[in-house]
Image (cartoon, rainbow, N blue to C red):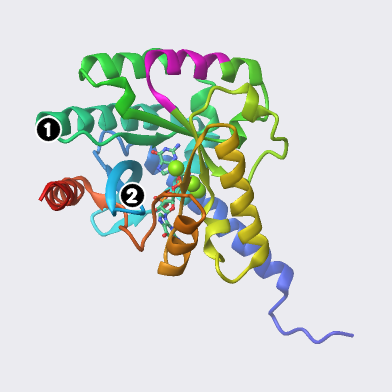
Amino acid sequence: HAKQTGTDPIQFYSLDLKIASERRLMLEEALRHAIEKEQFELYVQPIYDLRTNTIVKAEALLRWHISDDEMISPDIFIPIAEQSGQIVAIGRWVISSVCELLAQMSKQNLSVPLSLNLSPRQISDRHLFDFINNAVIKNKVSPDLLELEITEGVLVDNHEKVRKLLQELREMGVTVAIDDFGTGYSSLSYLKYLPIDSLKIDQSFVFDLGYNSDDQAIVLAVIAMAKSLKLGVVAEGIETQQQKDFLEQHDCIIGQGFLLSRPLTIYNFIKLVEQNYREIRG
Ligand code: C2E
Ligand code: MG
Ligand code: MG
Ligand code: MG
């Protein structure tokens, strides 16, 4: 007969679950007011030409200041917003803000293409095309400066609808990248079917470059495939010189990661771009 210790693991487990679901509900509720309370902020992570250390584009990454002293990671709140449907409104805030930033930069004679992330629920919003189109027109943004990042997850259902949407967006002039490439959908057939411009190699494969020969093989295969399909390739999550050297030596010349720059506030991003321009133009 087991001794009663009061540390029944099952009880603890359900308590953890209860706390997790309460926190989730709390976050979902707080998210409802995040836009009107102006709690969102765009951070921007520069993407570099690894050979020259030139900033060639940048990715907009959302931050949520849930209170004065707490910032919540998108890895936590995007999935909640995705499930609750709030991602559509939040995503529109991101689209508008990125277009405003592009307009602000072009007034300062800085033309750096910006990408933004779209999650599956946003892709299935039938007003997405019009919303993007209107934001581009309203801000007089050159559409080729806007890039959309989608994950393989959007392809789970309704390929044909996604293909049409992406086709329309590309006709408008925006470009499309597959984000976190290699972590999602298993079939590669969509690569010849979907109108896309580039692949972003997921950081989980970049992480062990130089140590793990399997990851090395995967990265080399993605680079080779992108090349033969005439797609661009971008490496994510470059943290070490060794990773950067490996990528550069194997013809993946575009990348982002903490080694090069963390995601920055808009203010610091613009300062860095100006400095980068000065260094290049002498
Ligand atoms: P993602 O689109 O794959 O973005 C890359 C993530 O990797 C970012 O995390 C970035 O800060 C992080 N990162 C960049 N370089 C490094 C590195 O060298 N090492 C490591 N360990 N991490 C690095 P973040 O900003 O926390 O965003 C997480 C994810 O949340 C994004 O992954 C994206 O899927 C999603 N997300 C962010 N902003 C938005 C948004 O506006 N809309 C939507 N739908 N999703 C977003
Ligand atoms: Mg991304
Ligand atoms: Mg990614
Ligand atoms: Mg990711």
Which segment did they paint magenta?
A: 164-175
Q: Report whether residue 127 is seen.
A: no
Q: Nearer the viewer, residue 237 or 280?
A: 280
Q: Position of residue 105 (x, y in %)?
A: 16, 34
- How packed mark 1 is, by other alpha carbons closer than 10 Å (few <14, some 14-19, many 20 or more), is few
| Image quadrant in which the N terminus is located | bottom right
Ligand 1 closer than 8 Å to the CB at disc 1?
A: no
Q: Nearer the viewer, residue 208 or 41?
A: 208
Q: Position of residue 196 (x, y in %)?
A: 52, 27
Judge whether 121 appears above or below 186 on screen. above
What residue is disc 1 on?
Answer: 109
Work out whether mark 2 precedes mark 1 in sequence or the reverse, and give the earlier one. 2
Q: CA distance from mark 2 to mark 1?
A: 19 Å
How many numbered marks have been drawn onto this rendered protein structure? 2
Residues at circles 2 and 1 in contact by the CB criterion of under 8 Å: no
Most extreme residue toward the right, as rendered? Answer: 1
Q: Amino acid at mark 1?
A: Asn
Q: Main secondary structure of the magenta part?
A: helix
Q: Nearer the viewer, residue 240 or 103?
A: 240
Q: Position of residue 49 (x, y in %)?
A: 34, 49
Q: Position of residue 89 (x, y in %)?
A: 39, 27
Label 1 residue SS: loop
Locate ligand 2 by image quadrant.
top left
Taking the image as shown, residue 213 lies to the left or right of residue 50, namely right
Q: Nearer the viewer, residue 185 or 225?
A: 225
Which dot marks residue 48?
2
- How packed mark 2 is, by other alpha carbons closer than 10 Å (few <14, some 14-19, many 20 or more), is many
Judge whether 255 appears above or below 168 on screen. below
Taking the image as shown, residue 122 lies to the left or right of residue 111, namely right
Q: Residue at x 85, y 84 (%)?
A: 2
Q: Amino acid at mark 2?
A: Tyr
